[in-house]
Amino acid sequence: MSDYLVDIPEQFYSDGDGKPFETCVVCGRNLMEDGTRYVIEKAMKNYEGYDFSATVFEYAMCLDCYQEMQKGMSEESMQNLQQYQMRLVQEKSADGVIAIDLSDFSLSDWLSKCFFKDKPVSEMKEYQLIGQFEGNHMIMNMPPMAIGEEVMEEMSELLSEQTKGEMDRFRRDFLGPSPEIEELIYGRKLIFL
Ligand SMILES: [Zn+2]
């Protein structure tokens, strides 16, 4: 099956300059080149009484670096995560397949609730957005997701201490700390899928 590509939606633009990400946060590779695959992850926060989400953390990472990072995850943690996600998907859909009707698809609706639990992100304190991209397009075969705080929390509990330590080290080395980020990272809430 060939990839179904769409323009990069603004939700996945870099907050830094309001444009699509251009380089891998780890190796600096140019992501805009055709055929270059990468992942974008954003951690969002809602402020009570305000009607918007602020980005507290964002990065784009090429697939090579992403896979390198995932090697820091123990086999056991990886399996735990996969089983957890599979269980949630099966709760949503008996055959374990979540279909997207592209004739009637609204990305902002899609990203307005947790992919796994359907709870609106507007009712949460924190959530994450994650998507896969190629050059200047988003890959819809692996649709972008919003992941709610409840699922982030539960996934974090499935990781071994060793895996959490490795993930923390990786983030510290490449993503650098800032007060807001510290809270998320060292609160160990960020999940890399
Ligand atoms: Zn890279």
Image (tube, rainbow, N blue to C red):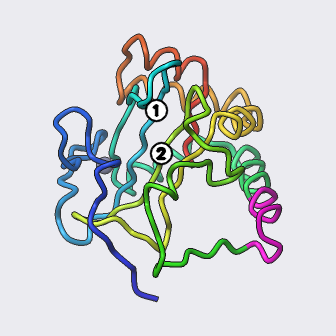
Disc 1 element = strand
- Boundaries of the magenta span: 86-96
Indicate yes or no whether the magenta region holds residue 95. Answer: yes
Q: Nearer the viewer, residue 118 or 74?
A: 118
Mark 1, Cα crowd under 10 Å, few <14 / some 14-19 / many 20+, is: many
Indicate yes or no whether the magenta region holds residue 93. Answer: yes
Query: Residue, x 40% and y 25% (percent of image)?
Result: 56
Query: Residue, x 63% and y 29% (percent of image)?
Result: 164
Which amino acid lies under the numbered mark 1 shown in the image of this protein?
Met
Disc 1: residue Cβ within 8 A of ligand 1's nearest atom: no
Residue reaching furthest top? 179
Disc 2: residue Cβ within 8 A of ligand 1's nearest atom: no
Residue 79 x/y as whole percent: 75, 53
Give the vertical position of 90 relative to 120 (above or below).
Answer: below
Give the vertical position of 41 relative to 136 (above or below).
Answer: above
User: CB atoms at circles 1 and 2 under 8 Å apart?
Assistant: yes
